[in-house]
Amino acid sequence: MPTNEPSFILPSQDAFQRATAIQAIKGQFIDSEIYFSLLADRVQDLINRADDPEYAMLYIYQLLEPMNLVDERPSEIETAGDVLVYQNDYLRERLYLAGVFETLPKQLDENNPQAEEMLNETNWESWLNALTTTPRDI
């Protein structure tokens, strides 16, 4: 995540940022397709690291489905991040409307230690909690 002004680590936006943070390399150009691809990779990694990846995948779907934040049930663990994020128009629209691209620069100029710490502290359950506690007025 960048440290541009305004900083992407915003007061009172911790849950939103925990849910939408991505890991990218310094100097990488970011557009919406790359962003959602990287977010899908992040979610896939969170699922893969779960004690029970199949449970994590299904639980995420079951929680997002009644909130209209998912349009397809993932059937394979290996593609769950892609289905839940990259191919998921409902989640993509919500993140667009929430303003995820308003503070994201076109190119990442520097590493953000605060964002790295946030990424390292997040597991699939805290990611899902952060995503589903984002204010509904988005």
Image (spheres, rainbow, N blue to C red):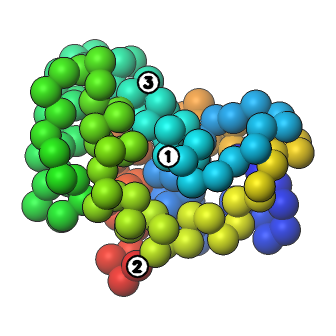
C-alpha distance separating marks 2 and 1: 18 Å
Quarter residue 83 falls in: top left
Dot 2 corresponds to which residue? Answer: 138
The reply, left or right, for residue 125 in relation to residue 10 is left
Q: Of marks 1 and 3, which one's residue comes earlier in the chain?
A: 1
**Other-residue count near label 3 (Cα within 10 Å), few / some / many at <14 / 14–19 / ≥20:** some
In percent of width and height, residue 124 lies at 36, 35
Q: Earlier in the sequence, mark 2 or mark 1?
A: 1
- Mark 1 residue type: Phe
Residue drawn at x 39%, y 27% is 44
> Residue 79, percent across and down?
29, 25
Q: Are marks 3 and 2 in contact (CB under 8 Å)?
A: no
Quadrant where the C terminus is found in the figure: bottom left
The span from disc 3 to disc 2 (Cα, nearest Å) is: 27 Å
**How packed is label 2: few (under 14 Cα within 10 Å), some, or many (20 or more)?**
few
Q: Nearer the viewer, residue 1 or 10?
A: 1
Q: In which quadrant of the rendered view does residue 7 lie?
A: bottom right
Q: Kindly identify the amino acid type of the residue bearing the numbered disc 2.
A: Ile
Q: Is residue 49 left or right of residue 54?
A: right
Q: Which mark is residue 36?
A: 1
Disc 2 is placed on an element classified as: loop
Name the residue beneath numbered marker 3.
45
Q: Earlier in the sequence, mark 3 or mark 2?
A: 3
The answer to whether mark 2 and mark 1 are in CB contact below 8 A is: no
Q: Amino acid at mark 3?
A: Asp
- Which mark identifies residue 4? none
| Along the viewing direction, whichever of 112 and 96 lies nearer the viewer | 96
Q: How many marks?
A: 3
Q: Secondary structure at mark 3?
A: helix
**From this viewpoint, is residue 68 visible?**
yes
State the residue at coordinates (30%, 50%). Answer: 88
